[in-house]
Image (cartoon, rainbow, N blue to C red):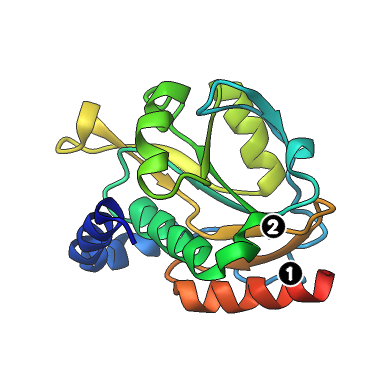
């Protein structure tokens, strides 16, 4: 790992206890796979942190990991992004078959430029996606995820965001495969992805 990644992991460790308290609040998506499969789909039109407009079709051909969050998230988001970064590192060359996406639910504060400063700190392969309130609402509806603005005096600008904290996995054809619950360790995600990539050929 780079020095920056090690620093991020240290910050994640400090935040772990607080994250445990927020995980239940931010985990309102289904935990199963089969029951969610018929209704969950990737359908979005959002701007990447590189300034390029993206839709779900741009990622066909790769295993796609999708996580919703926001840059001012104190613990759940950095913890999950660090796990995804570690997964990519552990996959080695097989990581070329995986595209992680971080979709911001905070359209008021998170614009492509903000995501460009935040997301690559975790891993250069993770792509941040931002959108208008309407675009985020439509994307959230397709993934069946929960998010809301929550007043909090001590947070930046006086509010934080409650949001679903699971990671979605889609296959190279764009079909929903499963959810990784909040706190799923990188080795577990890595082993699952490696087996799927090998089986897919």
Q: Which residue is mark 1?
A: 197
Of residues 22 and 45, the one nearer the viewer is 45
Disc 1 + disc 2, Cβ < 8 Å? yes
When asked about the image quadrant of residue 153, the answer is: top left
In this rendering, is residue 151 above or below 51? below
Instruction: Write the residue at 67% across / 40% down.
Output: 141
Residue 147 location (% of width, % of height)? 49, 43
141 relative to 67 in the view: left or right: right
Residue 101 location (% of width, % of height)? 57, 45
When asked about the image quadrant of residue 26, the answer is: bottom left
Q: Outermost residue toward the front?
A: 93
Instruction: Write the residue at 77% across / 71% down.
Output: 34
61 relative to 103 in the view: left or right: right
In this rendering, is residue 150 above or below 113? below
Instruction: Write the residue at 73% across / 43% down.
Output: 59
182 relative to 48 in the view: left or right: left
Local packing at callout 2 (Cα closer than 10 Å; few below 14, some 14-19, many 20+) is some
Residue 30 visible in image: no
Residue 172 location (% of width, % of height)? 80, 55
Q: Quadrant of the C terminus?
A: bottom right
When asked about the image quadrant of residue 117, the answer is: top left
Q: Which residue is mark 2?
A: 97
Instruction: Write the residue at 71% across / 70% down.
Output: 33
């Amino acid at each position: 790992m780079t020095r920056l990644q090690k620093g991020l992991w240290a910050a994640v460790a400090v935040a772990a206890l607080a994250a445990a308290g927020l995980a239940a609040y931010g985990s309102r998506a289904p935990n199963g796979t089969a029951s969610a499969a018929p209704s969950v789909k990737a359908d979005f039109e959002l701007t990447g942190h590189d300034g390029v407009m993206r839709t779900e079709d741009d990622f066909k051909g790769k295993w796609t990991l999708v996580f919703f969050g926001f840059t001012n998230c104190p613990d759940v988001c950095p913890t999950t992004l660090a796990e995804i970064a570690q997964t990519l590192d552990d996959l080695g060359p097989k990581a070329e078959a995986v595209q992680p996406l971080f979709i911001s639910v905070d359209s008021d504060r998170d614009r492509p430029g903000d995501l460009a400063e935040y997301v690559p700190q975790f891993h250069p392969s993770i792509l941040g996606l931002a959108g208008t309130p309407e675009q985020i609402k439509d994307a959230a509806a397709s993934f069946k995820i929960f998010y809301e603005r929550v007043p909090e005096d001590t947070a930046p600008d006086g509010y934080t965001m409650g949001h679903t904290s699971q990671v979605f996995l889609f296959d190279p054809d764009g079909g929903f495969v499963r959810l990784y619950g909040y706190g799923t360790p990188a080795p577990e995600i890595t082993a699952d992805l490696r087996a799927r990539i090998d089986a897919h050929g």
